[in-house]
Amino acid sequence: MYAHKGDHIVIRNPRLGGVVRDGEVLEVAHPDGSPPYRVRWSDNGHESFFFPGPDAYIDHGDVPAPSSPDNA
């Protein structure tokens, strides 16, 4: 998993109707974009360092899809 400053982390809840948690990546600890990330959580505004688990994914926002010869 790789993130950049400004990306959003989303944590899915496996329970039916469970709360989804998300936050903005404020800082990336490693130049290659690997964890941990300093995140500001949208539900309470707190900041923490976060190591994502298998229930988390990165929302990169409006990143264009890579082009290939088939769809160029």
Image (cartoon, rainbow, N blue to C red):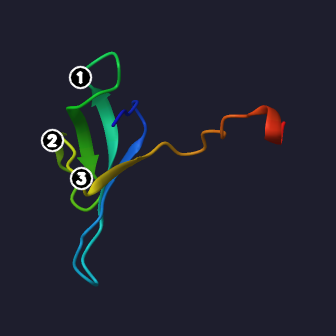
- What residue is at 23 percent from the left and 31 percent from the top? 35
- What residue is at 66 percent from the left and 40 percent from the top? 65
Question: In the rendered structure, which disc, 3 or 2, sits on the residue that comes first in sequence?
Answer: 2
Q: Residues within 10 Å of mark 3 (few under 14, many from 20)?
A: few
Q: Residues within 10 Å of mark 1 (few under 14, many from 20)?
A: few
Residue 5 occupies which quadrant of the picture? top left
Q: Position of residue 11 (x, y in %)?
A: 28, 58
From the viewer's side, name the closer residue of 20 and 45: 20
From the viewer's side, name the closer residue of 38 and 44: 38
Q: Position of residue 4 (x, y in %)?
A: 40, 30
Q: From mark 3 to mark 1, how far is it between C-alphas?
A: 19 Å
- Residue type at mark 2? Ser
Q: From mark 3 to mark 2, how far is it between C-alphas?
A: 18 Å
Q: From mark 1 to mark 2, how far is it between C-alphas?
A: 12 Å
Question: In the rendered structure, which disc, 1 or 2, sits on the residue that comes first in sequence?
Answer: 1
In the picture, the quarter occupied by the N terminus is top left
Q: Secondary structure at mark 2?
A: strand
Q: Which residue is mark 3?
A: 54
Furthest-front residue in view? Answer: 70
Q: Position of residue 3 (x, y in %)?
A: 38, 34
Relative to 46, 17 lies left or right? right
- Residue type at mark 3? Pro
Q: Which residue is mark 2?
A: 48
Which mark lies nearer to you, 3 or 2?
Answer: 3
Query: Do the CB atoms of the residues marked 1 and 2 lie less than 8 Å apart?
Result: no
Q: Which residue is mark 1?
A: 29
Residue 47 occupies which quadrant of the picture? top left
Which mark lies nearer to you, 1 or 2?
Answer: 1
From the viewer's side, name the closer residue of 36 and 53: 53
